[in-house]
């Protein structure tokens, strides 16, 4: 059985072949639902459960870990990928109590129909002594839901952080081995659910500063046994001013006119040594685009005109970007139209949450001609100048 420390077991489940989360987020490397069993000399606690689809595997792992009895089921977060097996756990361990904060308790009652008398509510900073293993509850809300908390296991200096610091990947490794890949998985996860709440996450990071953390055990992905790696990454991602010299170009094209403009523009950026990522929205992994949105200074959306407005794929992209609220500083729109277009007004209207400066759009009637290509060169020059002014070049 896999152990993080004496009497601290990893009992969660890998979901190798899951390819989509929330019916939205692509998972090229699957995911995991981590749960941990902490045995004290007096009491035993299970920290989180798993997605209900994987309850049987959790049961197998609990049997292997010798969990004859569980006194407490700590619920850090009411979302079903971590709480979904709690009802089954309460059937298996009928004397167990669910330990959580009042907000999460209410959500568990609403989402899973857990009875209030089965729940013990804990306050911020409250401790639970298992006998030589002391759990302290730290509220770390808005790492996308308002109720999320973490648990600090003082004796072993382990922070159980739930979604916070998690990475969507299935792996047989208990601890991080491929740092680059795990950071990318964490950046994908951060970008897709936590990025809109980065001001709250800044507060959560500050709250953790006094702790001398030896390892971070999140609820997705491997355990960080070098916690500064992920904490430093988060510190950069949530820093409002820490954008990088990079342009993200999501686009869609129907008959090739917008494609030609995008390709010319991307070449113009490359000629100016501006790092760029081009994403064809018809085939792109949206998660990869989101990874780039976490810190890119500029986004330029390419779209043709359909029924006077932007292409529906571009509308979806704009709506997604608006919901995720990246810290992007500059936004541009390029594309073509047949006889008339309201796409600039439409896309701009969809980006109301983005506190970015709008760059001069470049539209071409039909196939782009010399004037459009000149305007695309000007746009690339303008982006370079803007990035130089930010001091990121
Ligand atoms: Fe991993 Fe917010 O659930």
Image: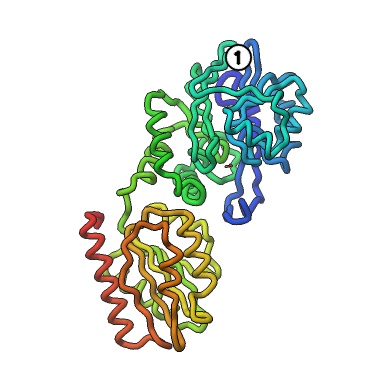
Residue at position x 68%, y 19% in the image: 71
Residue at position x 61%, y 41% in the image: 32
The residue depicted at 71 percent of the width and 37 percent of the height is: 112
**196 sits to left or right of 11:** left
Q: Is mark 1 within 8 Å of ligand 1?
A: no
Residue 265: image quadrant is bottom left
Q: From the top left corner, tell me how far across and down residue 296 is, in percent.
A: 36, 57
Q: According to the image, label 1 marks what residue?
A: 130
- Closest to the observer, 138 or 281: 138
Residue 262 at what x, y percent from top left?
40, 75
| Picture layout, residue 127 above or below residue 73 | above
Q: How is colour applied across the structure in the image? A: rainbow
Residue 70 horizontal/vertical position (percent): 70, 21
Q: Viewer-proximal residue, 148 or 116?
A: 116
Is 385 or 197 nearer to us in this picture? Answer: 197
Q: Residues within 10 Å of mark 1 (few under 14, many from 20)?
A: some
**In this image, 246 relative to 165: left or right?**
left
Classify the position of the C terminus by image quarter.
Answer: bottom left
Question: In the rendered picture of this protein, how many numbered marks are placed on residues?
Answer: 1
- Left or right placement of residue 147 versus residue 59 in this view: left
Q: Determine the residue positioned at 61% across, 19% down.
A: 7
Position of residue 266 relative to residue 13, above or below, is below
Q: Quadrant of ligand 1?
A: top right
């Amino acid at each position: 059985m896999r152990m993080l420390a004496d009497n601290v077991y990893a009992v969660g489940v890998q979901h190798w072949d899951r390819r989509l989360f929330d019916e939205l987020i692509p998972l090229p490397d699957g995911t995991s639902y981590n749960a941990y069993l902490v045995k004290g000399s007096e009491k035993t606690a299970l920290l989180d459960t798993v997605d209900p689809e994987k309850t049987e595997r959790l049961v197998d792992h609990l049997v292997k870990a010798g969990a004859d009895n569980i006194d407490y089921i700590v619920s850090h977060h009411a979302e079903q990928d971590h709480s979904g097996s709690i009802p089954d756990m309460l059937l298996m361990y009928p004397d167990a109590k669910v330990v959580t904060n009042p907000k999460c308790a209410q959500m568990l009652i609403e989402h899973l129909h857990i009875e209030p008398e089965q729940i013990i509510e804990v306050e911020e900073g409250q401790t639970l002594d298992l006998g030589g293993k002391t759990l302290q509850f730290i509220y770390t809300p808005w790492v996308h839901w308002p109720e999320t908390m973490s648990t600090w296991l003082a004796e072993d200096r382990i922070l159980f952080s739930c979604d916070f610091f998690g990475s969507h990947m299935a792996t047989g490794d208990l601890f991080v081995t491929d740092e680059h890949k795990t950071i990318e998985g964490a950046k994908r996860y951060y970008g897709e659910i936590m990025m809109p709440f980065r001001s709250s996450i800044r507060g959560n990071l500050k709250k953790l500063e006094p702790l001398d953390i030896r390892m971070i055990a999140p609820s997705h992905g491997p355990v960080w046994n070098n916690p500064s790696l992920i904490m430093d990454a988060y510190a950069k991602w949530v820093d409002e001013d820490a954008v990088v010299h990079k342009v993200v170009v999501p686009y869609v094209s129907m008959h090739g006119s917008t494609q030609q403009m995008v390709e010319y523009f991307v070449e113009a950026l490359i000629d100016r040594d501006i790092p760029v990522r081009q994403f064809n929205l018809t085939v792109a992994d949206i998660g990869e685009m989101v990874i780039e949105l976490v810190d890119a200074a500029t986004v330029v959306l390419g779209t043709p005109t359909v029924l006077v407005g932007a292409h529906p794929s571009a509308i979806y992209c704009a709506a997604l970007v608006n919901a995720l609220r990246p810290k992007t500083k500059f936004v541009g729109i390029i594309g073509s139209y047949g006889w008339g277009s309201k796409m600039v007004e439409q896309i701009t209207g969809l980006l109301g949450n983005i506190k970015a400066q709008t760059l001069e759009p470049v539209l071409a009637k039909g196939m782009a001609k010399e004037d459009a290509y000149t305007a695309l060169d000007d746009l690339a020059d303008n982006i370079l100048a803007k990035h130089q002014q930010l001091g990121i070049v």
